[in-house]
Image (tube, rainbow, N blue to C red):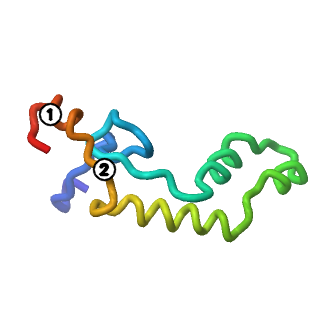
C-alpha cells in the first residue's frame, strides 16, 4: 500500500454504539441477530440453521451498517476528539 501512496491504520475511528472512538455508528436493525449468530454457532449444522437469521434480516443489517457508517450519518464524539488535542 505504501508503494502506491496509500496510508493505513489499524486504529478504528468509527465504532458501533461507543464513545471510545472519534465517531460512533448507530446499531442497525437486526444487527443483534447477525452478531448472535456469529458468536453462538458451533459445529452442529442443524443447530446452526436454527440460529441463523433470515436472509432478509441479514441483508438489512449489513445494508444498515453501510448506511449508518457513512460520515454524514455518524455521531462525532466531541469529548474524545478534544481529549486527543483536536477540535471537533
Outermost top residue? 83
Determine whether 62 is above or below 41 in the image: below
- The CA span between labels 1 and 2 is 14 Å
The residue under the point 76% across, 56% down is 52
The residue under the point 68% across, 41% down is 39
Disc 1 secondary structure class: helix
Label disc, if present, on residue 15 of the rendered structure? none
x then y, percent, for residue 86: 10, 38
Disc 2 secondary structure class: strand
User: Dividing the image into 4 quarters, which one contains the C terminus?
Assistant: top left
The residue under the point 21% across, 40% down is 78
Q: Name the residue tied to disc 1.
A: 82
The residue under the point 42% across, 66% down is 67
x then y, percent, for residue 81: 18, 37
Determine whether 1 is above or below 57 in the image: above
x then y, percent, for residue 17: 43, 43
Q: Between 9 and 78, which is closer to the camera in this rendering?
A: 78
Residue 71 position by quadrant = bottom left
User: Dividing the image into 4 quarters, which one contains the N terminus?
Assistant: bottom left
Q: Earlier in the sequence, mark 1 or mark 2?
A: 2
Label disc, if present, on residue 75 of the rendered structure? 2
Q: Between 71 and 42, which is closer to the camera in this rendering?
A: 71
Residue 69 located left or right of residue 88: right
Circle 1: is it few (<14), some (14-19), or many (20+) Cα within 10 Å? few
Q: Between 65 and 77, which is closer to the camera in this rendering?
A: 77
Circle 2: is it few (<14), some (14-19), or many (20+) Cα within 10 Å? some
Amino acid at each position: 500500500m505504501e508503494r502506491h501512496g496509500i496510508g493505513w491504520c489499524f486504529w478504528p475511528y468509527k465504532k458501533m454504539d461507543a464513545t471510545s472512538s472519534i465517531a460512533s455508528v448507530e446499531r442497525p436493525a437486526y444487527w443483534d441477530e447477525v452478531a448472535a449468530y456469529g458468536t453462538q454457532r458451533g459445529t452442529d449444522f442443524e443447530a446452526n440453521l436454527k440460529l441463523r437469521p433470515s436472509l432478509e434480516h441479514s441483508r438489512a443489517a449489513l445494508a444498515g451498517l453501510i448506511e449508518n457508517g457513512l460520515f454524514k450519518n455518524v455521531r462525532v464524539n466531541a469529548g474524545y476528539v478534544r481529549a486527543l488535542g483536536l477540535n471537533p
